[in-house]
Amino acid sequence: MTGFDRHSVPLLRDLPDVRGYFGAYGGRFVPETLMAPLVELEAAFRKFRRDLTFRRELNGFLKNFAGRPTPLLFAENLTKRLGGPRVYLKREDLCHTGAHKVNNTLGQCLLAKRLGKKRVIAETGAGQHGVGTATACALLSLSCEVYMGAEDMERQALNVFRMRSMGAKVIPVTSGSRTLKDAINEAMRDWVTNVQTTFYCIGSVVGPHPYPWMVREFQSVIGREVKHQIRDYQTGDPDALVACVGGGSNAIGLFAPFYDHKRVKFFGVEAGGEGLRSGRHSATLCTGRPGVLHGAYTYLMQDDNGQVLGTHSISAGLDYPAVGPEHAFYKDSGRATYVAATDKEALAGFKLLNETEGLSAALESSHALGSLPRLVRPMKNSQSVVLCLSGRGDKDMGQLTGILHLGSSDPKNT
């Protein structure tokens, strides 16, 4: 465990610490204008996360609106195809809006309402967080504006329409790479100038404290459900957990409730793009170095001068040059292993699940599926693995139609 004494690694209840750090990572690196609203937000979250009325209202929305609990499916055909351990799928694709993002947006938007904020802003990459925010705002009668990279708007036109249909204003971001990083930049600029009236709903476990902690807590419903649901199939914990990692919210949501269960292995799968040596990828933990981006100290893709590098991924939701600070801590402490799946492997994962289980995964989740054959290879048939199916592939069908040869065993070269 690089740089850590195994016996000194903190328990989950101590992460983050009072300053908002996960080991060396996290903190608040923001303009002075944002310090007061962040302190206010932290105090509100500490209060309301223990408030029975707040928790009861949120749990009601999760159950009756979002559709929780989501099933844990034994993927029998996929298990047979891989010829290894039993594979279970945590069906976050069955959440209302089609992904895990709504777990967090319901929590944050309910918190915004308790704080008396009338306007909510958000950033989005693949559009799922934008849709989740627009949905929660419509439910709670809040104004919603979503910043989205112009390139991502082209890739995810369906989700743009969905946001607008719920009354949200979608603001194209044409600066920089025109993707998620730049959407976050614009959202933070907006928040700096409108802190009195505006709540910034961040979509992943990124950004300044308390966002990485707060989003983790809202998304941990995923892993908490798995802890109970796996008992319907076996007596103990799963041997391994697998999830895709961009900012990393679905992965942290699955991993965190098992953090103190040291026998359970964690595997996070980043976007390998055209290969790690190509320079066209988004594999931050596999290739990056520590630095500061969007208010937190974490791993990021940067050059020797500290300038943020451009990224590439076939999936808009993983096309991001940094990662949540808790994942950075998991990497350095050895608690999780991070690998990369290329665009081709993600397409193969998409086809694999369709052919074996009749399920179409989002391109983000398809990265986890694409890495699954090699991750399970060393495992025994008596073991088990849970993969987080973080979203469904409806949003990607237009993009995939131009990439995959229907009826062919091999995708086009991307």
Image (cartoon, rainbow, N blue to C red):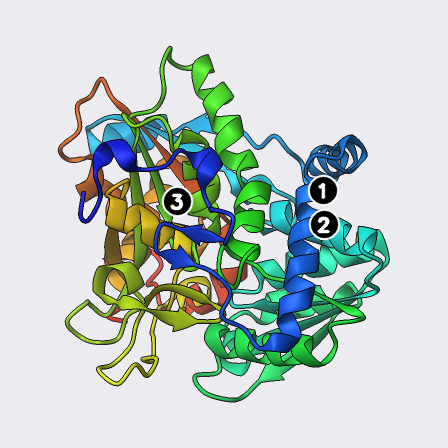
Q: Three-letter amino acid code at disc 2?
A: Ala
Residue at (68, 66) in percent of width and height: 36
How crowded is the residue under tag 2: few (<14 C-alpha within 10 Å), some, or many (20+)? Answer: some
Kindly indicate the quadrant of the structure image that contains residue 121: bottom right
How crowded is the residue under tag 3: few (<14 C-alpha within 10 Å), some, or many (20+)? Answer: some
**Mark 3 residue element:** helix
Per the model, the C-alpha gap separating discs 3 and 2 is 43 Å
Mark sitting earlier along the chain (3/1): 1
Residue at (70, 66) in percent of width and height: 163
The quarter of the picture where the C terminus appears is bottom left
The quarter of the picture where the N terminus appears is top left
Q: Which residue is mark 1?
A: 47
As drawn, the residue found furthest toward the top would be 235
Between tags 3 and 1, which lies in front? 1
Q: Nearer the viewer, residue 85 or 28?
A: 28
Kindly indicate the quadrant of the structure image that contains residue 53: top right
Kindly indicate the quadrant of the structure image that contains residue 267: top left
Q: CB of mark 1 within 8 Å of CB of mark 2?
A: yes
Q: Which residue is mark 2?
A: 44
